[in-house]
Image (cartoon, rainbow, N blue to C red):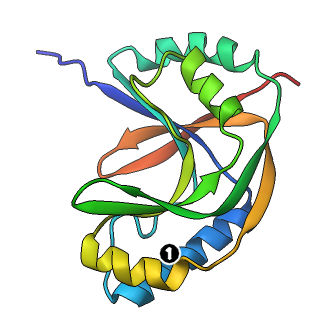
Amino acid sequence: METKASHELLFIISPPPAIAEYVAMLKQHVRLAIGHPFEDEFAKAHITLFQYRDARAEDWLYQVDSTIASFAPFHVHIKNLNFHDHGTTRTIYLEVVHKNPICEIVERLGQPEGEFTPFIPIARNLDINDFIKAWRSLKNLSYSDYFRCDHITVLKKAPRRWTYYMDLSFAA
C-alpha cells in the first residue's frame, strides 16, 4: 500500500556572507556567555518568512513563483539587537528596520495568520537565566547594515534538518 508523504517547505531570505558571518560571531558570543549549547546555535543567518506543509507543496510553488516574480528587488536594513519575550523564554535577534517589503511578500502569499515580524535570529528560546547572561553581554552592541534582496530561498524538510531546494527570483 502506497502512502503519500507530506512535504514541508520553508521560505526564507538569506543575507550575504558578511552579515551571515557577523551572525555566526554573535552566536559564538552567546555560547561563551551562557557556557553551553543552545537551540539553533549552528543555524545559518536568515529571515524566516513562513512554512508550508502540504502533499502538493511542489505544485503550489508554481503559484508562488509567479507571485514572487512580480516583486521588485529591495533593500533589507538591519539595525541593532532586540529580543522577543515569549513568557518563560526569550529570543535575541537582529532587527529588520523597514519591514514593509518583507511583510508585503508574506501577506500576498497568504501566510501566516496573525502578526508577522521579520528578524534575523541569534539565539532562540533561551530560558530566563541564559537570556540575562547573553543579553548583558550583547545589549550595548551597535550594528547597522543592509543588503539587496532579489530572491526568496526555499528549503525542504529532510530528516532532522532543512536542505536547500530552490531560489525564487524577483522581477529583473
The answer to whether residue 127 is left or right of residue 30 is left
Residue 99: image x %, image y %? Answer: 66, 38
In the figure, 130 relative to 124: above or below?
below
In the figure, 115 relative to 140: above or below?
above
Q: Secondary structure at mark 1?
A: helix
Residue occupying the far left of the picture: 1
Residue depicted at x 34% and y 19%: 54
Residue depicted at x 69% and y 48%: 97
Q: Which residue is mark 1?
A: 27
The answer to whether residue 141 is left or right of residue 41 is right
The answer to whether residue 2 is left or right of residue 7 is left
The answer to whether residue 69 is left or right of residue 122 is right
Q: Residues within 10 Å of mark 1 (few under 14, many from 20)?
A: many
Q: Nearer the viewer, residue 33 or 129?
A: 129
Rendered image quadrant of residue 102: top right
Residue type marked 1 = Lys
Residue occupying the far right of the picture: 172
Residue 22: image x %, image y %? Answer: 66, 72
Residue 67: image x %, image y %? Answer: 66, 14
Q: Nearer the viewer, residue 73 or 76?
A: 76
Quarter of the C terminus within the rendering = top right
